[in-house]
Amino acid sequence: MRDTSDKEYVDYVSARIPALRRLAYLLAGDEHRADDLVQQTITTLYVKWRRAQAADKLDAYVRTMLVRTYLDERRLAWARVRLFRETPEPPPLRDDGVEERQVVRAALSRVPRRQQAVLVLRFFYDLPVDEVAATLGCSSGTVKSQTSRGLATLRRLLGERDFAGFSAVT
Amino acid sequence: MPSELDLLRSLDGEPHTPSTVDIRRAIAEGRRRRVHRGVGYAGAATVTALAVAGASVVGTSHHTPSRTTAGTSPTAASAPPKAAYTIPGTAGWSPAAATPPTGCALNRLPTPDDAPMALVTGADPTGRYLVGRTYPKPGSYQAVIWHDGDVRKVMLPGDLEESLQDVNSTGTAVGWSYTGGGEADTRPIPYVYRDGKVSELPGVRRGNAYAINDAGAIVGDDDTGNAALVWPSATAEPIRLPLPAGASQGTARDIDEDGTTVGTINNERPYVWFPDGTHRELPMPSLDGKQATTARVFHIRNGWATGVASNGLGRDGAANPSPGRSDARAERDRTRAVRWNVRTGEVRVFGAFKNMADTVNAHGWQVGIDERGRAVLVADAATVVLPALANPQPGSLSNIATTLSDDGRTIAGQSDDATGTIQAVVWRCR
């Protein structure tokens, strides 16, 4: 019984690790913190596997687990030492769009944690407001206000950096 | 031209390093947690004063650290010019003598409005005042202050994220909150809470306050200019602490009773600013026979400073494996707990803690998490294991001791209950 269940878990997790790492990487900002986040998430998933399997949308259930682990900053070793907000300056310019992404990433990391999650889920993943609200455990109204505040913060941060080629949406 | 939505979508979502996620390890740890849950104690929801017997004294291998006399003149790296500033403190302050406790009992702290989740973030040196925050609803934060068993809400402006970080023995607390008058204005702002009133600290547009001493001096940083700051008082303009040549970024994280301030430069070099205006880098410890490449300081009390050092972490926290090593996890795990004596320059690595000590008191005693996930007090030669609300899970952060009084009798922090919910707790030790 446990063997069958374990095999299903391993099959599922093996297939989902790349997607989970992408989401974790977007949220956490570097690979090693991202891997920590995924490791924590799949460990919890193992503990709750029986209940999780019964979930309506398993992928969304696991994504919610990952996002909430990320928001619950005191459980992550790197967040405890507040490395996260201390993002260094982006590396020197490289002429392939890399710098642009680095600047956006650096700006994103200075947005409050929940706004970051809202922005990533809504605009990178194109999730509807209701689904983001369910993931974060808050109301749709909160998601909307956090979206607008998060975008405003990003706009200001990017403006502060005098970002070439950037125009604010008004 | 791209909008910010295009910019967000332009984010590179693909990690560039091979995965270090380990399914077998997840299963092994998951099984352990299932077992712990199975035998976990019942009735977490109703427990308010759980005294756990059998907190034990284990291990006596730590030798007594060399104690320095309070008030010893700090040694500066070079003969400085006359100081441009003085950091306020209590000159000649020295702690009362204390003997390490032998056991501790655990009590849950009350929360306003019966908030389901809470944690402690700071305390005064006597342990009578505690600060922390509750989570009234998922994702919402409420700063609180406890005093002699009572709890009260501290209404920091803003509804995004807030944290009180420290409090002194007169009950004056400091912290930060994300606030913004307009939507384009979201930023952390440093606050002080005194006599029931919250005020913004002067002199910065965005920044954080981390600690306050009994003389009322506050340390923190300027989030825009990346400057380390000392506010001589809650109403005075901050002093921008000098950085060594070549440094671009500094943060001041804690302040001692005599005004000595510690922090980190460029997020990788441990630093101390003395009250007389002299300042210098703290020495890097030796880790496994090699000098550490980065270190950060988080706390200071009576000349004892604590932090972390590592061989593998770059300044952004990313592993930077040396040639011939592919195991990034092993590199990262080399973050080690370090304690400095800033007066003598002595530096020592503490293997009793998994990664770091969570704080230090006037006698150099420390609290932290050991390899087995237990919160422990390391006091001179004694290690006292602090009881938990539910069985601690190895490798987890289910029990964190955040504060430690000078007499070693009051420790506060957080402990997960049997449902995995973080609870604010205080340990009373004998």
Image: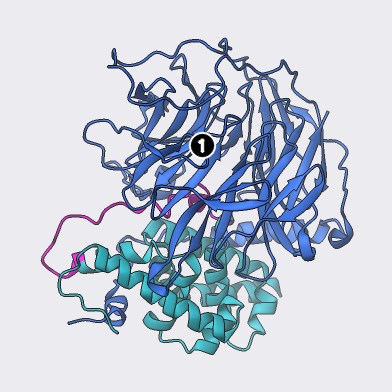
The subunit carrying tag 1 is B
Q: Secondary structure at mark 1?
A: loop
Q: Quadrant of residue A27?
A: bottom left
Pointer 1 residue: B233
User: Mark 1 packing: few (<14 Cα in 10 Å), some, or many (20+)?
Assistant: some
Between A77 and B193, the one lying in front of the other is B193
Question: Which residue sits at x=27%, y=77%?
Answer: B7
For the C terminus of chain B, give its image quadrant. top right
Question: Which residue sits at x=39%, y=13%?
Answer: B75
Above or below residue B52? Residue B282 is: above
**B164 on left or right of B46:** left
Residue A158 drawn in magenta? no
**B327 on left or right of B64:** left
Question: Which residue sits at x=69%, y=77%?
Answer: A50
**Chain A tint in image:** cyan
Above or below residue B58? Residue B137 is: below
Indicate the amino acid at tag 1: Ser
Residue extent of the magenta highlight? A75-99
Measured as percent of width and height from the top left, residue B329 is found at 43, 49
Between B337 and B148, the one lying in front of the other is B148
Among the chains, which one is blue? Answer: B
Measured as percent of width and height from the top left, residue A42 is found at 56, 67
